[in-house]
Amino acid sequence: MGPGAAVESTHRLFLLLSAVQPLPVAVVEYSSHQTQSERSAALGAFKAATAAGRGMVLVASDAMTRGMDIKVRFSRSPQTRTARA
């Protein structure tokens, strides 16, 4: 899978999660589909939400997040399941 496929997969996952209603947390995309100012706004919103203790999902490819240092609090209820693509 080339880098373009990862970008497309990230964008499709964002669109899918955005379409799920009602989702208990906000979803934000961080990808090369966006301008730098849109990515900065998305990352700022994610950091602000997590700092305030609100849940938010950041959808990004591994290439986009290399070198990022984000501190988050993570907890999950017993009913929550995690999956990895």
Image (spheres, grey):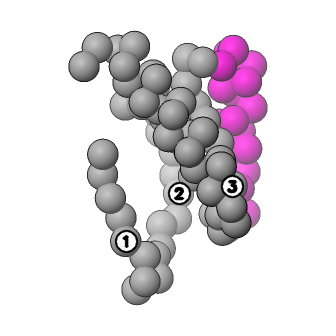
Bin the neighbour count of mark 1 within 10 Å (Cα to Cα): few under 14, some 14-19, many 20 and up: few
Which structural element holds mark 2? loop
Residue visible at 69% across and 15% down? Answer: 35
Is disc 3 placed on a helix, strand or loop? Answer: strand
1 vs 3, left or right, is left
Real-space CA distance between mark 1 and mark 3, rounded to the nearest whole angstrom: 18 Å
Amino acid marked by disc 2:
Val
Residue 36 belongs to the span the image colors magenta? yes
Q: Residue at x 69, y 61 (%)?
A: 21
Of residue 43 and residue 58, the one placed in the foreground of this image is 58
Separation of residues labelled 2 and 3 (CA atoms): 15 Å
Tell me, for residue 51, which label it has, or none.
Answer: none
Q: Looking at the rendering, which quadrant does residue 16 occupy?
A: top right
- Magenta segment includes 41: yes
Closer to the chain start, of discs 2 and 3, is 3
Element at label 1: loop
Q: Magenta segment range?
A: 34-53
x, y percentage for residue 52?
Answer: 72, 63
Q: Which of the 4 quarters of the picture holds residue 41? A: top right
Between 44 and 20, the residue placed more toward the observer is 20
- The answer, for residue 63, to whether it is visible in the render is no
Q: Is residue 61 above or below residue 13?
A: above
| Residue situated furthest bottom in the rendering | 78
Main secondary structure found in the magenta portion = helix
Q: Position of residue 84 (x, y in %)?
A: 30, 52
Query: Which is nearer the N-term, disc 1 or disc 2?
Result: 2
Q: Is residue 12 above or below residue 50?
A: above
Q: Which residue is mark 3?
A: 26
Q: Give the amino acid at mark 3.
A: Ala
Number of the label disc, if any, that sits on residue 72: 2
